[in-house]
Image (cartoon, rainbow, N blue to C red):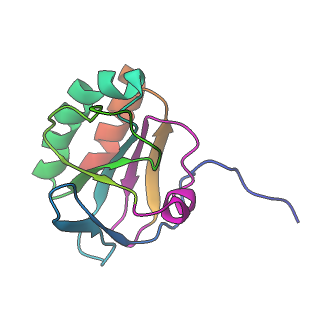
Amino acid sequence: MTAGSPSAQVGDVLPSFETTLANGQRAGVLYDGKSKYLLYIFSAQCEACLRELPTWNNLTTSARDKNIRVAALEVVQSRAPGKKMPEADFASMIFPSIGVQRAYRVMTVPTTMLVSSKGVIEWVQSGALDSQATAELLSAIDR
């Protein structure tokens, strides 16, 4: 028996989860068969993640036009005092536990995922999005 890739792959099934936002509100990612999700996985301490914001904001507009839910998921780690994700056009939440983060098989940030309404990864890119990856993702969003 061989082990699969340690990083997220197309076809992987992801768990739903709930978490509490900084303001005390409950939020989460629920694969209920109703809506796809576009997920941005980041760390507020990652400069490459912060450089992705303009691209992620543009993708958010396209995703919402197709009724795709959009969320940013921050990896579980100790945050430097005062360090947080700048304002963006999408909700940002922290993975509720290291176990859920491991289930998403995040090996690199930034990571961008398009996930079906049933929780199956349809498209994934680890690392920054270049123009080709962005075009591929837009095509997947339009399907």
- Left or right of 92? Residue 2 is right
Q: What stretch is highlighted in magenta?
A: 96-119
Whole-percent x, y for residue 133 in the image: 41, 30
Up-down relation of residue 16 to residue 53 (above or below): below
Does 102 appear in magenta? yes
Whole-percent x, y for residue 141 in the image: 28, 48
Up-down relation of residue 128 to residue 25 (above or below): above
Q: Residue at position x 29%, y 38% from top? A: 138
Q: Which corner quadrant of the image does residue 115 belong to?
A: bottom left
Q: Residue at position x 40%, y 22% from top? A: 48
Q: Which of 40 and 66 is in front in this view?
A: 40
- Left or right of 92? Residue 47 is right
Q: Which of 139 and 114 is in front in this view?
A: 114
Whole-percent x, y for residue 83 in the image: 30, 31
Q: Residue at position x 31%, y 21% from top? A: 51
Query: Which quadrant holds the N terminus?
Result: bottom right
Q: Residue at position x 47%, y 35% from top? A: 109
Does 123 appear in magenta? no
Whole-percent x, y for residue 62 in the image: 16, 42
- Left or right of 2? Residue 75 is left
Residue furthest toward the bottom? 32
Residue furthest toward the right? 1
